[in-house]
Image (tube, rainbow, N blue to C red):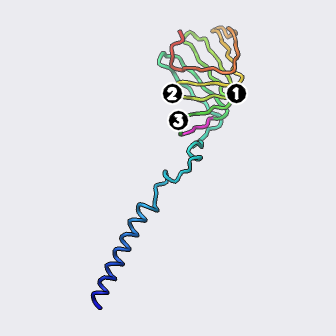
Amino acid sequence: MENKQNILLVSVFLLLAGLSVWLQFGLLESPDEKIAESEKNDPDYYVENFTSKGMDSFGRSYEIVSDRLVHYPVGDRVLLDNPVIVQFEVDGTARRVSAESGWLYNNRTTILLTGNVRVVEGRSDNSVGGSASTKKMVIHLDEDRG
């Protein structure tokens, strides 16, 4: 009789140990593993009335203004709604580029603008130096334009 109790006790102990291992590695997955594929391409944050100022490696400043910025973690992509990019030259001239939408890439140094892109060149005396329009445009913020 005592032998049967020992076998039963060992069996219950093994069953509990097995259940613990199964719960640890089988049921309790990390939260990252439970994210659905469709959710991986969803944005993780957005900003309304976004403004950013910066300076490139050549000492020229620029400003990016957008109605909304949306960040996508996959590929570290940033969508801009109605962006306006103003690039200031050292001599005081400025280039103003606007579009319906834009994407920031390459660690925020490249902008792909799409939809009714308009470029206006300004002079230091505040007169317009020229203008152009296109459907798409790529701006490299950290590139020598001289």
Residue closest to the eye, 92 or 21: 21
Task: Decide which of tag 1 and tag 2 comes sooner along the chain.
Answer: 1
Helix, strand or loop for disc 2 = loop
Residue 87: quadrant of the picture: top right
Q: In the image, what residue occupies the spot 47% across and 18% down? A: 57
Say what amino acid the circle numbered 1 marks: Glu
The dominant secondary structure in magenta is strand
- Residue 71, above or below 105: below
**Location of mark 2 (residue):** 106
Helix, strand or loop for disc 1 = loop
Residue 36 coordinates in the image, percent (x, y): 56, 50
Label 1 vs label 3: CA separation?
21 Å
Q: Is residue 72 magenta?
A: yes
Q: Quadrant of the N terminus?
A: bottom left
Q: In the image, what residue occupies the spot 65% across and 30% down? A: 66
Say what amino acid the circle numbered 2 marks: Asn
Label 2 vs label 3: CA separation?
9 Å
| Residue that extends furthest to the left in the rendered view of this protein | 3
The magenta segment is 69-73
Task: Decide which of tag 1 and tag 3 comes sooner along the chain.
Answer: 3
| Image side of residue 59 versus residue 13, left or right | right
Task: Decide which of tag 2 and tag 3 comes sooner along the chain.
Answer: 3
Q: In the image, what residue occupies the spot 48% across and 15% down? A: 58
Say what amino acid the circle numbered 3 marks: Asp
**Location of mark 1 (residue):** 100
